[in-house]
Image: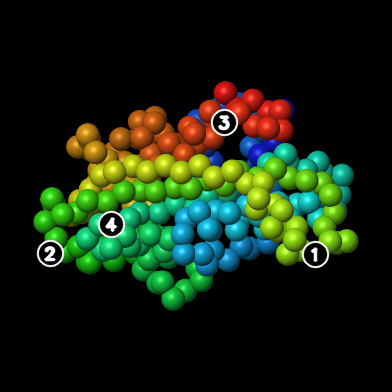
Amino acid sequence: MPAILVATRNAHKVSEIRAILGNQFQYLTLNDFPGAPKVIEDADTFAGNATKKAVELAEWLAAREMDAKPLPDFVLADDSGLEVDVLNGAPGVFSARFAAMDSAHNSSDADNNAKLLRLLKDVPLEKRTARFRCVLAFAPISPTKVEPSSPVCYAEEMESRIELFDGACEGRILFKPRGANGFGYDPLFVPEGFDETFAELGDEVKNKLSHRAKAAEKLSKRKWKMGLRMD
């Protein structure tokens, strides 16, 4: 069974991806590789951050001694966030650290939601349009050591082999949180066609509507050159 390293420690993300891709893979996370490097997400687009994470982790896995632990076959990295139209697309790539944008560390969900509500305090409902957006970067892992060659050249080669898949979910932002499920901005976000927030709809419905689900669905339909059928 092919193994995918999902580049996160967030169990919610992994469960969404597993729900779409199914049981044809073994799913690993960064919790299985405690020595994995911390990737600085400093790109100005979701695609840039997802690609950077996939490249750096694939390079690290290919280069290190695994102590008889087999390499995963692929790295799956994502970057995602909320874009609010009246805020010119903010918080965008800063969604996870919106309440403390000068910090390298993520803010709490409560702090991020509170800041968003403060900024939208006087904005009427019809102008509170927003979307969740996600980009998945899917990279094969080569077991070839990288020491003999330039790390820059290796990274460029890895980047050229990455496939990107994007997804978006349109909706609007409420005036106060509702629901106890989900994470992030889910208690404030109502997807188009629904009256409930993501935090009220539950995982079964959310996994069919979400930005990450739509990106993962595109990935699941991809026929890979390396001989792996994804459908």
- Viewer-nearest of discs 2 and 3: 3
Residue identifier under label 3: 222
> Along the polypeptide, which appears first: circle 2 or circle 3?
2
Residue identifier under label 4: 84
> Along the polypeptide, which appears first: circle 4 or circle 2?
4
Pointers 2 and 1 in contact (CB under 8 A)?
Answer: no
* Real-space Cα separation, disc 2 to disc 1, in angstroms: 53 Å
* Real-space Cα separation, disc 4 to disc 1, in angstroms: 41 Å
Secondary structure under the numbered disc 2 in the rendered image: loop
Picture coordinates of residue 96, whole percent (x, y): 43, 60
Picture coordinates of residue 220, whole percent (x, y): 54, 30
Amino acid marked by disc 3:
Arg
Pointers 2 and 3 in contact (CB under 8 A)?
Answer: no
Residue identifier under label 2: 122
Q: Quadrant of the N terminus?
A: top right
Residue at the spot 36% in from the left edge and 48% down from the top edge: 132
